[in-house]
Image (cartoon, rainbow, N blue to C red):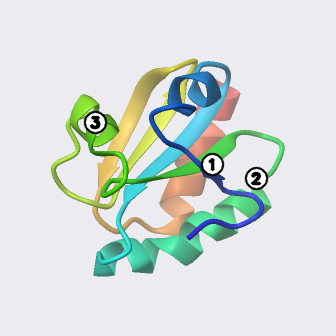
Amino acid sequence: MSTNNTLELNARNFDEETSHGLSMVDFWAPWCGPCRMMGPIIDALAGEMEGQLKIAKVNVDENETLAARFGVMTIPSIFIMRDGEVLKQFVGVQSKEMLKNTLLEALSA
């Protein structure tokens, strides 16, 4: 469930990919209905904001240790991160506008 603009993260590349700059990471699973609802929103943001930040996905079924490390109990869980540190976390379906505004705010901070 990845597009050309969305990065797939796992235990091997997570720290390297999120350690510099701004990132939005979507913890999801293919069987999760709300996650499937978020998919097109995440993909649209990845296209619209390409080059400004990394937008990535973590499949919790394949990366249980990462989900546990971030305390993900409910999916979708979306983390806004800067230089490896969590700035904000959202749980459940979020609107594209709210996420984009949050990302733009973080970019300008």
Classed neighbour count for the residue bearing mark 3: other residues with Cα under 10 Å, few (<14), some (14–19), many (≥20): few
Residue at the outermost left position: 73
Q: Which residue does the image show at 56% across and 24% down from the upper left? A: 82
Which of the two discs, 3 and 2, labels the residue nearer the N terminus?
A: 2
CA–CA distance in space, label 3 to label 1: 20 Å
Query: Does residue 25 sit above or below 44 in this rendering?
Result: above
Instruction: State the image coordinates of residue 102 (x, y, percent, origin top left).
Output: 53, 45
CA–CA distance in space, label 2 to label 1: 9 Å
Task: Give the quadrant of residue 106.
Answer: top right
Classed neighbour count for the residue bearing mark 2: other residues with Cα under 10 Å, few (<14), some (14–19), many (≥20): some
Q: Name the residue under label 1.
A: 55
Q: Name the residue under label 2.
A: 49
Amino acid residing under circle 3: Thr
Instruction: State the image coordinates of residue 42 (x, y, percent, origin top left).
Output: 57, 64
**Residue 41 appears left or right of 4:** left
Q: Which of marks 3 and 2 is in front?
A: 3
Tag 3–tag 1 contact (CB < 8 Å) = no
Amino acid residing under circle 2: Met
Circle number at residue 104? none
Q: Is mark 2 on a helix, strand or loop?
A: loop
Residue at the outermost right position: 51
Q: Which of marks 3 and 1 is in front?
A: 3
Q: Which residue does the image show at 45% across and 34% down from the upper left? A: 11
**Residue 44 appears left or right of 86:** right
Q: Name the residue under label 3.
A: 65
Query: Does residue 51 sit above or below 86 in this rendering?
Result: below
Q: Which residue does the image show at 77% across and 63% down from the upper left? A: 4
Instruction: State the image coordinates of residue 40 (x, y, percent, origin top left).
Output: 57, 76
Amino acid residing under circle 1: Ile
Which of the two discs, 2 and 1, labels the residue nearer the N terminus?
A: 2
Classed neighbour count for the residue bearing mark 1: other residues with Cα under 10 Å, few (<14), some (14–19), many (≥20): many
Q: Nearer the viewer, mark 2 or mark 1?
A: 1
